[in-house]
Image (cartoon, rainbow, N blue to C red):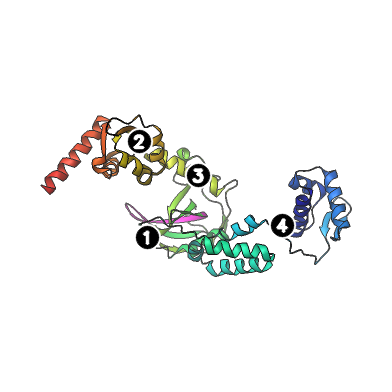
């Protein structure tokens, strides 16, 4: 354990420069006294650590000293070569950079770790898009990614279901979900001066139930018809965390869309297909399944969307399912089936 801590201390000083004993203690989760002992141990082993006295003092490595020792285990080194899928990196305009970074990392690793990393690449491949669906064409993705990085406002035309709209957006982050790229962005005020650094229309992401038109919203990147970068910059909202925003948005989206519960009688074949066709809602439904009857059919409670969407989803189960309730949904299924029967008679 102490060897790991000494290595962490060395890498902290190498990557961050001068650090005080309390700062190092907080990072390493040890006492200040332990930090002093560890610094002495580094010095005794030949690492040139310089101590600077005074209120602005601290510890730093002698100028020019670098170590190629990474402290990576074989599993950690191999996992780095799975960290970036080549397709998404290429979409972002970073394909060549990812390849160059992996080559540099491979060259810096000890021989045994480099060999494991090569074997990882030969045996594992990440393919982000879902089956049986082409990924969206995203001609503006690289430009949007640059604006996210540079904190620059985007002037966009976006295709909504009701038609194209113009939006000035403060792009906060990109998410790749099931092969589809999404942009989390806040609305910027109209008429911003080109040299002005502006704040987004929202100070921080509120819960979805409280969001207004000016809040942080999600945009499908493939629906941007045009994207321009006028030159204005913006300040990121304090406290905004992309991962937390996305997780909360996804949870609330599912809760908002699947508000109804259908009682469905399913054959064994339909129960096997339920997770593939209904995702997490299908998995949860299987947990509610009652005991199978003599024919092997069982009842489940399945969260569904409303109206025609639920009818279309449930029709996918074909003759392997019977909707028992609610009554209005059962009638809607019966009407749809009768219309189909008449069409194919």
Residue 219 % position (x, y): 43, 53
Q: Nearer the viewer, mark 1 or mark 4?
A: 4
- The residue nearer to you, when weighing 138 against 143, is 138
Residue at x 26% of width, y 31% of height: 324
- First reached walking from the N terminus: tag 3 or tag 2: 3
- Label 1: element kind: loop
Distance between the alpha carbons at the discs numbered 2 and 4: 49 Å
- The residue nearer to you, when weighing 291 against 240, is 291
- First reached walking from the N terminus: tag 1 or tag 4: 4
Badge 1 is on which residue?
134
- The residue nearer to you, when weighing 275 against 337, is 275
Badge 2 is on which residue?
302
Q: Is residue 280 above or below residue 132?
A: above
Q: Nearer the viewer, mark 4 or mark 3?
A: 4
Residue 34 % position (x, y): 83, 45
- First reached walking from the N terminus: tag 2 or tag 4: 4
Distance between the alpha carbons at the discs numbered 1 and 3: 24 Å
Is there any visible trace of residue 95 in the rendered image? yes
Distance between the alpha carbons at the discs numbered 3 and 2: 22 Å
Residue 169 part of the magenta segment: yes
Residue at x 46% of width, y 44% of height: 250
Q: Is residue 151 left or right of residue 111?
A: left
Residue 81 % position (x, y): 58, 61
Determine which of the numbered discs, if any, sits on residue 247 in the image.
3
- First reached walking from the N terminus: tag 4 or tag 3: 4
Badge 4 is on which residue?
71
Residue 298 % position (x, y): 31, 32
């Amino acid at each position: 354990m102490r060897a790991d801590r000494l290595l962490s201390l060395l890498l902290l000083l190498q990557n961050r420069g001068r650090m005080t004993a309390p700062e190092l203690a907080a990072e390493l989760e040890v006492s200040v006294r332990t930090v002093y002992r560890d610094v002495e141990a580094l010095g005794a082993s030949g690492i040139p650590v310089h101590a600077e006295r005074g209120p602005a003092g601290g510890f730093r490595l002698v100028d020019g000293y670098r170590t190629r020792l990474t402290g990576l285990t074989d599993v950690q080194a191999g996992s780095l070569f799975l960290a970036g899928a080549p397709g998404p990196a290429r979409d972002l305009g970073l394909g060549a950079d990812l390849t160059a970074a992996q080559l540099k990392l491979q060259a810096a690793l000890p021989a045994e770790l480099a060999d494991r990393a090569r074997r990882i690449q030969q045996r594992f491949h990440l393919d982000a898009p879902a089956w049986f669906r082409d990924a969206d064409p995203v001609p503006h993705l690289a430009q949007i990614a640059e604006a996210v990085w540079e904190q620059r406002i985007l002037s966009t035309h976006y295709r909504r279901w009701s038609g194209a709209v113009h939006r000035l957006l403060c792009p906060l982050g990109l998410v790749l979900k099931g092969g589809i790229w999404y942009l989390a962005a806040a609305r910027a005020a109209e008429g911003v001066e080109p040299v002005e650094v502006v704040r987004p229309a929202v100070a921080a992401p509120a819960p979805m139930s409280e969001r207004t038109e000016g809040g942080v919203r999600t945009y499908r990147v493939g629906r941007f018809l045009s994207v321009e970068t006028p030159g204005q910059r913006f300040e990121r909202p304090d406290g905004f965390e992309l991962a937390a925003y996305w997780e909360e948005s996804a949870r609330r989206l599912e809760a908002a869309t699947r508000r109804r519960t259908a009682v469905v009688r399913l054959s064994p074949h339909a129960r096997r297909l339920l997770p593939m066709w209904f995702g997490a809602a299908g998995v949860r439904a299987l947990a509610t399944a009652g005991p199978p009857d003599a024919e092997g059919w069982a009842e489940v409670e399945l969260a569904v969307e409303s109206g025609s969407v639920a009818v279309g989803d449930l029709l996918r189960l074909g003759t392997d399912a019977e909707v028992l309730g609610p009554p209005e949904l059962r009638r809607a299924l019966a009407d749809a089936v009768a219309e189909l029967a008449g069409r194919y008679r």
